[in-house]
Image (cartoon, rainbow, N blue to C red):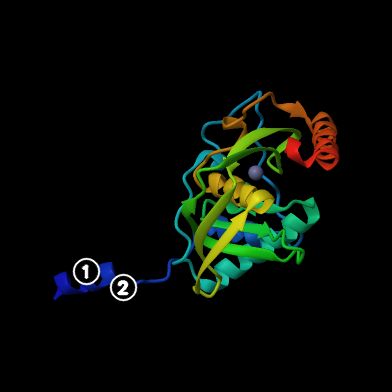
Amino acid sequence: MAGLGLLLDGCAPRALTPPRRDMDLLAIHEGPLPIVQWLTEQPDPGSVLRRHADDAARLRRWYLAALDDGMRRTLAAAGGVGLAAPQVGIPSRVILVQRQDGSEDVLTCVDPVILERSDEEVEGWEACLSIRGVGGKVSRARALRLRYRDLDGGAHVLETRDWEARIFQHELDHLDGVLYVDKLVGPLLPIEEMRRLREEEKAAVARDPAAR
Ligand code: ZN
């Protein structure tokens, strides 16, 4: 019967206990978690930011809730619009995205997958909480349809576009070890310079919507 036992074990969706190191990381920080930094002038190929993150849906629910809680504190303290678990040192497929529909709700997506992306791409400015002080332009699909699970395992499909779709694509890249600096369509700029150019472009579009 040992063989049958193994077979059943292999098929059953058993909950996984996360590695001790990850549990400790969440347990010792009551406030924001430290954000893993990527130094463009000193790249570290062994960084958690370069790993393909593991599926998260089978992690224990209490652990996912603790991870979500820690990530939310971190995102709020940093004032960002999105965060991926590898950015707090945990290689699991979990992202947070602040909705851009006026609600500013923060959505937790477990094991998000892009089902469909628009052929149309748009260039836009991005920065990253893991790459301080700089920003650059990246070309992304204008619209997406994606699937994810919530913390209770419920499956959802979401359609998103424009700035919010950009945030999703940026965060999803983090789960595959990809950083926006890998995809630049122009120079990497000091953040102040990026903000100045972004404001100039916004003003130009406001003056002449056709210039978009
Ligand atoms: Zn980022």
Q: Quadrant of the N terminus?
A: bottom left
Q: Secondary structure at mark 1?
A: helix
Of marks 1 and 2, which one's residue comes earlier in the chain? 1
State the residue in front, 50 or 154: 154
Q: Is residue 123 above or below residue 14?
A: above
Toward which corner of the image does residue 187 lie, by quadrant?
top right
State the residue in front, 36 or 154: 154
Toward which corner of the image does residue 159 lie, by quadrant?
bottom right
Q: Amino acid at mark 2?
A: Ala
Q: Secondary structure at mark 2?
A: loop
Q: Residue at x 55, y 49 (%)?
A: 172
Locate residue 23, reporting x and y percent: 57, 61
Q: Is mark 1 within 8 Å of ligand 1?
A: no
Q: Which residue is mark 1?
A: 6
Locate residue 5, reporting x and y percent: 21, 74
Q: Residue at x 56, y 73 (%)?
A: 62
Q: Is residue 169 above or below residue 73?
A: above
Does 68 sit left or right of 129 as displayed?
Answer: left
Does 59 sit left or right of 169 as displayed?
Answer: left
Q: Which residue is mark 2?
A: 12
Q: Amino acid at mark 1?
A: Leu
Q: Residue at x 62, y 32 (%)?
A: 181
Q: Residue at x 59, y 53 (%)?
A: 85
Tag 2: Cα neighbours inside 10 Å, few (<14), some, or many (≥20)? few
Nearer to us: label 1 or label 2: 2
Locate residue 164, reporting x and y percent: 66, 53
Mark seen at residue 195: none
**Mark 1 → mark 2, Cα distance in angstroms:** 10 Å
Q: Is residue 86 visible?
A: no
